[in-house]
Amino acid sequence: MKTKIRVAVVAAFAMFACLAQGQSGGMSRASAQPAAVQYLYPEQVTLVAGKPGSVALHFRIAPGMHINSHTPREDYLIPTTFSIPDGAGVHLKDAVYPAGSDLTLPIDPKTKLSVYTGEFIIQAHIVAVPGNHLVEAKLHFQACDSSQCLPPRTIPVTFDVIGK
């Protein structure tokens, strides 16, 4: 009886570890699949302190995947959004998102989705206070392939802003 309990406990911990690994956002050892969306660059930008500046943030979506655009056609679809938390030394005035591309899925050929695929750029208009700021911004999205959607995710978008 103790052996059965021990095996059940070990199995439960193994299952929990696998689930936690899958939520980590990096490569999953079991599936060796890359993250659905990766932040590419820039790593550092220099702006005039106190004046609005534009930063082009580059992202890549994994092959075979898509994410909803910032303006999906249906209210129930999760839009892609970029944000910078308060207290980062940098204020997000606004973000300009690319237009989505039309995508029709085989399961529903009458519905056109507005999505991003491949690489895309968000133009963030920001204002920095003087100094060096490590900005830990966020990109929120929901990634899907042609047959299923993954749970919504938020990934870090980390870059250094020098306000001169």
Image: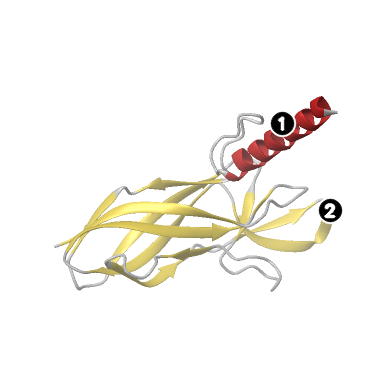
Residue bearing mark 1: 10
Q: Position of residue 29 (x, y in %)?
A: 61, 29
Residue at the image position 42 percent from the left and 68 percent from the top = 95
Residue 161: percent from left, percent from top: 25, 57
Residues under labels 1 and 2: Cα distance? Answer: 40 Å
Which numbered tag is attached to residue 107?
2
- Please provide percent x and percent y for residue 45: 25, 54
Is 6 left, or right, of 143 in this rendering? right
Say which of marks 1 and 2 sits in front. 1
Q: Amino acid at mark 2?
A: Ile
Q: Residue drawn 32% across and 52% down? A: 159
Instruction: Residue lying at the far front in this picture: please name it.
Output: 2
Kindly give the residue lying farthest to the left in the view shown.
164
What residue do we see at 68% from left, 70% from top? 73
Q: Nearer the viewer, residue 158 or 6?
A: 6
Amino acid type, callout 1? Val
Residue 111: x and y, percent? 78, 63
Query: Residue 132's mark?
Result: none
Question: Which of the 4 quarters of the picture holds residue 126?
Answer: bottom left
